Image (cartoon, helix red, strand yellow):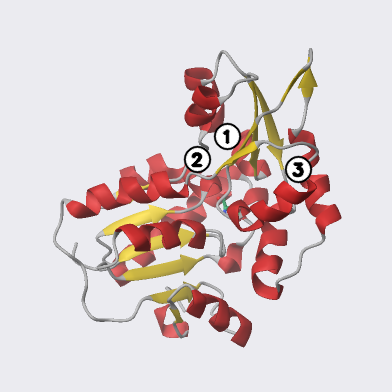
Amino acid sequence: MSGPVLVFDSGVGGLSVLRELRVLAPDQRYVYVADDAAFPYGNWEEAALKRHMIALFGELIARWQPRLVLIACNTASTLAIDALRKAYPGETFVGTVPAIKPAAERTRSGIVAVLATPGTVKRQYTRDLIRDYADTCHVRLVGSSNLAALAETYMRDGFVDEAAVLAEIEPCFIEIDGRRTDIVVLACTHYPFLVNRMRKVAPWPVDWIDPAEAIARRAQSLLAQGARGGTGEADIAVFTSGRADASRGHLMKGFGLAVAGAGATPAA
Ligand code: DGL
């Protein structure tokens, strides 16, 4: 396909991956799709979310003919990446899944926390990553119902309640036989936007693993195999709700994206 690179998330979290990919592949054209009409993905029932995503991607692929689809969402990737590849075999998909392997390689205490949405911590995909790559570690899975929404608010309003952030991250910090958590995996693409606040309120210092750069490198290596995608057209953000208020426009502009009108939304 010769169209843009389509970067997808349930909300604005995928921008943490887009900003890395832009640096690595500045000549591509980008369409950022936020399925805000269905946000948050973290609380969806699995079968319903999978059906929803397969239908939505049918429309997105027909509309944009993307050269590559980057699912910049752990909740979506851990559930549906295999099903999407099967449903759309002509497409190149890059997913985002919890960085459990690098965490297991780096931990010194042997205690690692995976901070994610309730959906991601429940997934078999996540359990399999732990079994395959972290069987010598103690992995604490922490499902947060509120952090993605707190990150959305922070991105929009520039304010976040630090006590609320602490309440969400506190279960990551555990102590077993004198050893403490030393790595927290940010397994939701929204969370890197809050990492400075997390660092500030954390009970003790840890490494926070943000896999955005690694995911962007994977996407870039696949893009490098194809022709360049620059068409001179603007990079845009599409919201499935069709809502495009001023603060949203301002935020997207900061990431080099113009907010597209309702016509760009599938089935609008
Ligand atoms: N950004 C999404 C992720 O990486 C989750 C946000 C949501 O709950 O929709 O998992």
Picture quadrant of residue 114: top right
Left or right of 25? Residue 176 is: right
Q: Indicate whether 137 appears above or below 58.
A: above
Q: Which amino acid does label 1 sit on?
A: Arg
Pointer 1: what residue?
123
Query: Given contact means CB atoms under 8 Å apart, are the residues at marks 1 and 2 in contact?
Result: yes
Q: Which amino acid does label 2 sit on?
A: Thr
Which residue is at the front of the view, 53 or 78?
Answer: 78
Q: Where is residue 2 in the image (x, y as percent from the top left)?
A: 18, 66
Q: How crowded is mark 3: few (under 14 residues within 10 Å), some or many (20 or more)?
A: many
Q: Which mark is residue 169?
A: 3
Q: Nearer the viewer, residue 33 or 155?
A: 155
**Whole-Å distance between the Cαs marked 3 and 2?**
21 Å
Nearer-N-terminus badge (1/3):
1
Label number found at residue 53? none
Residue 50 visible in the shown view: yes
Q: How far apart are marks 1 and 3 (CA)?
A: 20 Å
Give the left or right position of residue 41, taking residue 213 as reference: right
Q: Can residue 89 be seen in this view?
A: no
Q: Position of residue 218 (x, y in %)?
A: 32, 45
In the picture as drawn, the residue positioned furthest to the left comes out as: 227
From the top left corner, tell me how far across and down residue 184 is, in percent. Answer: 64, 36
Label ID, residue 78: 2
Mark 2 falls on what kind of element?
A: helix
